[in-house]
Image (cartoon, rainbow, N blue to C red):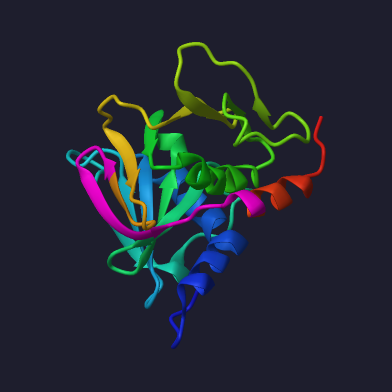
Amino acid sequence: MSKAEGVTVTDTVQWLHDEGLARLALISRTAPSPIVAFTVEVATGTVTAFPVVVTGPGTDVLTLPADDLPPPSDSPKRLVIIGLTATDSVLVLDFAAIPAFVLRAERPETTARAWVAQLLLDPEVTIITNSPHLAVPAGIRCRHTFIPGGGTLLTVDDKRPPVTTITLNSADNATDQLDVAEDGSAELYLGNRFWQLRHVLSIDDPTWATLITQVEPSE
């Protein structure tokens, strides 16, 4: 994605879905320390990669132009576009580096649906949830089932440990969490890191109902 006049948030998100996420996935796989988040500045295309840990060897924040990213990998893995930051960058999380995450909102399912829709773009990802508002009727890659322990959650598995567990509206304090306000803005905490988001992606009921009817059955 070259720097250009008039680049919009929509352009940046489209580029991420077309190839950007798959290119970021290679950064995650080859970095000296696991990468937990990326930002892509809308105006310039500058990519910043944030390691899981914030101190010690191999934990420096990496910044480079989008055009210098490696060629796309075979899939975006567990990378998910979360939303737009207050500084006009698109924020991406790598859930492969987040074993446990808490999502809080008045209706957390609408935000979680945006993540589910993206995660299922990787054919190796399977999702299990105890929420009927998140399951996809076709096939078994995103299925509804009973999960012991209480609470609403979903697990994400791409055959590369660890499995990610996302809990909705947990009352427990969490190191890694997203708190979504009624106006669609949010606060994201990842360990010692913090982002203010102007807008998070979500999928409302009518759009979700249409989307899941278009999913091809899987075996």
Q: In the drawing, does residue 167 fall left or right of residue 190?
A: right
- Residue 190 at x, y percent in the picture: 28, 41
Vertical order, 128 against 96 (above or below): above
Comparing 217 with 24, the one in front is 217
Residue found at x 69% / y 40%: 123
Residue that lies at the very extreme toward the top in this rendered image:
148
Q: Nearer the viewer, residue 5 or 23?
A: 5
Q: Position of residue 23 (x, y in %)?
A: 53, 57
Identify the residue shown where x is 57% and y is 29%.
131
| 158 left or right, relative to 185 | right
Instruction: Give the residue at the far bottom of this rendering.
Output: 5
Q: Is residue 50 visible?
A: yes
Q: Which quadrant does the C terminus fall into?
A: top right
Measuring from the top left, give residue 206's x and y in whole percent: 65, 53
- Look at 35% across and 27% down and name the residue there: 170
- Residue under the point 17% across and 40% down: 55
Instruction: Tell me if residue 163 can be seen.
Output: no
Residue 143 in the image, given as x and y percentages of width and height = 67, 28
Tell me which segment is drawn in magenta: 189-206
In front of the other: 93 or 113: 113
Question: Is residue 159 located in the magenta-colored stretch of the structure?
Answer: no
Q: Quadrant of residue 119?
A: top right
